[in-house]
Image (cartoon, rainbow, N blue to C red):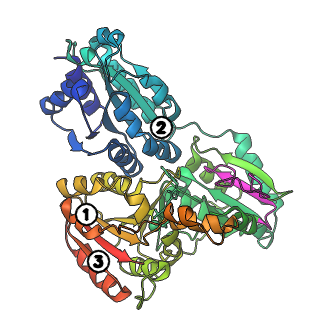
Amino acid sequence: MNGAESLIRTAVAAGVEVCFANPGTTELPIVAALDAVEGIRAVLGLFEGVCTGAADGYGRMADRPAITLLHLGPGFANGIANLHNARRARSPIVNLIGDHATWHVAADAPLTSDIVSLARPVSAWIRSAQSSQSLAADIAEAIAAAGHACGQIATLIVPSDCQWEPADGPAAPIRIAPGEAPPDRAIDSAGAAFRHSGSKLAGSNLALLLGGRALRERGLAAAARIAAVSGCRLLCETFPARVERGAGMPALERLPYFPEQVLDTLGKLETIVLAGAREPVAFFGYPNLPSRLVPDGCRVETLATPEQDVVTALEALAEAIGASHSQVAQASLNRPALPVGPLNAMTVGAALAALMPEGAIVMDEAATTGLPFFMASAGAPRHTYLALTGGAIGQGLPCATGAAIACPDRRVIAFQADGSAMYTIQALWTQARERLNVTTLLCNNRSYRILQVELYRAGVTEPGRKARSLTELGNPDLDWVRMARAMGVPAVRVETAESLTENIRRAFAEPGPQLIEMML
Ligand SMILES: Cc1ncc(C[n+]2csc(CCOP(=O)(O)OP(=O)(O)O)c2C)c(N)n1
Ligand SMILES: [Mg+2]
């Protein structure tokens, strides 16, 4: 057996089931090893950002890493933007990057580059493999690192001679230590904040800000019990990696995007308890607005950091304040009415919330068209919501692709803005080839609308010819139906809410991917 086969056998033994790949010559022994070993699916992405974004979506839904297989420094660099989003989402991912044979690096052949420097900002763990004999142990360690502390990115650089030289065999999987529990004093001091706030009425001055794993079912159940007893507000971070929501789940107030709105939302709070979320900061710096969005005089307690075991911490806090068995009001099923008339953010959001099936996974990269959907779907059937965590657009279609591979029995909805879609549109081809149940709702507003809004906010009320040209997507218009069909995805264009609802119904009833182009 060669190094590559020992690597793939070790990965499969450790529970890795998928490899999102865009390989080249330096990865070919690993490509061949994928055929030598049963139990791992090889998925081709036609751009590395599709592979890394798919690994992010897969990791968020499966809670274990997929492997990406990428080609030297340039291939990896193409995947960095979505690894940035994955790092913010704390997704478990193992990147395998092929490199020149160890003895060929000195020749400085055209594809030679400093891969470690490219990998460092997005990787919690990096190693350059040294020999074929150590590859099995290297990948076992990489997989363990990816699973550490809820999830992180591990990058293993594998010279091609290490792949083709002989190896002894696979290595045993490494047991992953459970996430670090927050210290008792964090729970004591959060508990004190709750007791201090006293009566239920006073509880509205107190908020639990939930993020990371706190937004999964168990964390939310504990948070809901805490809120039922204390009357505290339950806030959700602005861009959650994954939230379980809909009927039966507690209602959350999501922090808004613009800093002045966040200041407004948090304005009356006396205490914020952080549970798996970081202290809120502005997405960008603006003149006359602060970075830190905690109101003056508001106390901040950290119950658990995003890296700690926040679920255990929330359960301990519930216990500490006598909320372990409190009765929680369950949100009932409450869908919006089917919309009629022209398509806009309101009608599109209502149509999706009215029709999405139980167990849907919604990947929201709808940008300015997305907001009303979140409110409208609070009482939709149970579903999972995924957000763009790191602000690097081009994540939605790949992430939806990976989520669909992790959860083949669930309908995935890529709620997708047009400008953002164009970064990684090749993901549609992977969806078609792998026959994934992804319905893309494409928001065609023919613009980078958010940038137009930001220009306006900055006082540019009459943008000039160049500013318009840099924020409009027309001339020529993109034809999404033809683009989708060209990649094997059936597609239709809709101009009204009535036609949208009819086509959503039809799409959800059929297996495989589809795209609905919505003219806004
Ligand atoms: C990788 C990356 N490049 C560029 C940007 C800057 N940017 C932010 S939003 C945006 C345009 C978004 O347009 P679209 O996806 O059509 O959404 P809309 O604002 O029209 O709703 C751009 C270019 C970014 N955030 N990330
Ligand atoms: Mg747009």
Label 3 packing within 10 angstroms: few (<14), some (14-19), many (20+): some
Q: Which residues are magenta?
A: 267-294
Q: Is residue 152 magenta?
A: no
Please say whether residue 292 is one of the residues in the magenta stretch: yes
Q: Earlier in the sequence, mark 3 or mark 1?
A: 1
Placement of the C terminus among the 4 image quadrants: bottom left
Q: Are marks 2 and 1 in contact (CB under 8 Å)?
A: no
Q: Secondary structure at mark 1?
A: helix
Q: Is residue 95 visible?
A: no
- Left/right placement of residue 506 relative to residue 70 reads left
Q: Tag 1: residue type?
A: Met
Camera-nearest residue between 115 and 255: 115
> For the residue carrying disc 1, how many other residues have a C-alpha within 10 Å: few (<14), some (14-19), or many (20+)?
some
Q: Main secondary structure of the magenta part?
A: loop
Find residue 483 and name its label. Answer: 1
Q: Residue at x 44, y 39 (%)?
A: 80
N-term mark: 2 or 1: 2
Residue 311 visible in the picture: yes
Q: Which mark is residue 200?
A: none
Would the CB of label 1 be found within 8 Å of ligand 1?
no
**Tag 2: amino acid:** Gln
- Name above or below for residue 214 compared with residue 305: below
Q: Is residue 411 left or right of residue 445?
A: left
Q: 450 above or below 201?
A: above
In this rendered view, identify the residue nearer to me: 170 or 491. 491
Q: Position of residue 6 (x, y in %)?
A: 23, 21
Q: Which residue is mark 3?
A: 493
Residue 508 position by quadrant: bottom left
The residue at the point 50 percent across, 69 percent down is 249
- Please provide percent x and percent y for residue 128: 39, 18
- Residue at mark 2: 152
Q: 250 or 257, which lies in front? A: 257
